[in-house]
Amino acid sequence: MKTKLSFYSNVVFGVDSAMSPHLNFAPTLKSVGILIDSSLRDNEHVKRFVQYIRDVYKIAHVQWYKVEHEPTYDDMDCLALTFRHLSIDFVIGVGGGTVLDLAKGVGILYTNFGRALDYRGLDKVQNSSLPVVLLPTTAGTGSEVTKTASFIDTVSKTKLGINGKNVACAIGVLDPLFLLSCPKNVSVFSGLDVLVHAIEAVTCRSSNSLSKLLGAEAFSIMHKALPAVVCNPQDIEARENTLLASYYAGLAMSMAGGGISSGLSYPLGVDYGIPHGLAGGISIPVVCNLCHSLGYYGGYAYIYDATIKERTVGMSDVEKSTAFLKCLQDLYTAIGFNQTLSSFGIREKDVITLAQKTFEGRKANMDLNPVPVEIVDLENIIRNLL
């Protein structure tokens, strides 16, 4: 696919787009600091990209970062100490969601003094961030199009992002060549993250016409692409489509917000160390079944129409919603997903506490669910996942 700039935001998309002249986006910027997931140290495409950047800019520092857990505010502070001592004009982040969010954090703390926690919340970042270029090596978070960077507060044991103004990156580079070495389980978990973003952007109470359009299209694309990637990780077209789905879903989520599965992913990640995509994706089929059982059909019917297209003529919304639930379950079967919460040490004795923490701590997510739910509903969702 030919490299091009998206009209939605400053995103370069397509095979070998990492070598695009669009990356020379500001001739006045001379020096760069690069943050890269250390697992990519021997990746041929990463090596070629770093050399390409070296030919265009002065590289002041390359920081290889070992990802061992979801990013914390402490991690952000430590990295900021390194980069604040450099004379740089912009930052590049290469990796999965953790590295991308940390790259955003470095850009913020380079121009805004103090500790990372000072900027937790909405619109706390007063000075423009140092320009940040993001090159995802997984297809899931959509960080390249969102005005958020999520971190864990290790003291309060809560996860809340830095959101709003001066948080978005300058350019996102969506090059499927950088996904070819992505491990199967990471590809699956990232894909589940996209499904959560897509479904909730269509169904949540704050959805709008554009979030529905993009969310449904994201689901439709990922529905075909994710099984193809699982079957053949070197399928470059499928990899490209997962990036496109992630991008659409990220845009949709940024417009509409997230529901129960997004909310539940926070305590699952903070308290039990469950990878973010898995933490949200494990519950979305159960949440959809609950909402369907409580009489909600419209959003699922909408997604089913976008996914199956002409074969839905003559079906009622109830029938389409029922078919969507089967379509979703068949997708999970096709990618071989059979994870349970029990495998992460969660037991029946933890259900009430986990439900309370989610229901109270992520109340905004609960309120965005398309039908009202009580804490007992959340307890039943968790029990179904054990």
Image (cartoon, grey):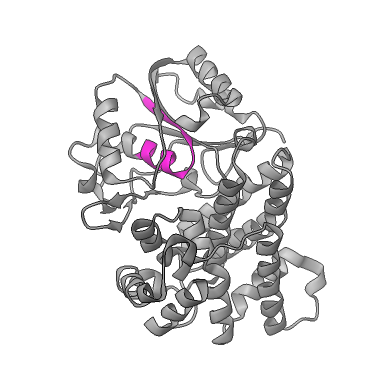
In the rendered structure, the answer to whether residue 259 lies left or right of residue 12 reads: left
Q: Residue at x 60, y 25 (%)?
A: 45
Percent across and percent down for residue 302 are 65, 71
Q: Residue at x 55, y 27 (%)?
A: 22
Q: Up-down: is 86 above or below 276?
A: above
Report whether residue 129 is seen.
no
Report whether residue 23 is seen.
yes
Residue 251 shown in magenta = no
Front one among 172 and 323: 323
Q: Residue at x 50, y 19 (%)?
A: 53
Q: Residue at x 57, y 57 (%)?
A: 192
Residue 96 shown in magenta = yes
Magenta segment: 90-104
Percent across and percent down for residue 378 are 43, 78
Percent across and percent down for residue 314 are 80, 81
Q: Quadrant of the N terminus?
A: top right
Which quadrant holds residue 47?
A: top right
Q: Up-down: is 117 above or below 90?
A: below
Q: Up-down: is 358 above or below 218?
A: below
Q: How many marks?
A: 0
Front one among 330 and 143: 330
Front one among 200 and 126: 200
In the rendered structure, the answer to whether residue 317 lies left or right of residue 106 reads: right
Percent across and percent down for residue 157 are 26, 57
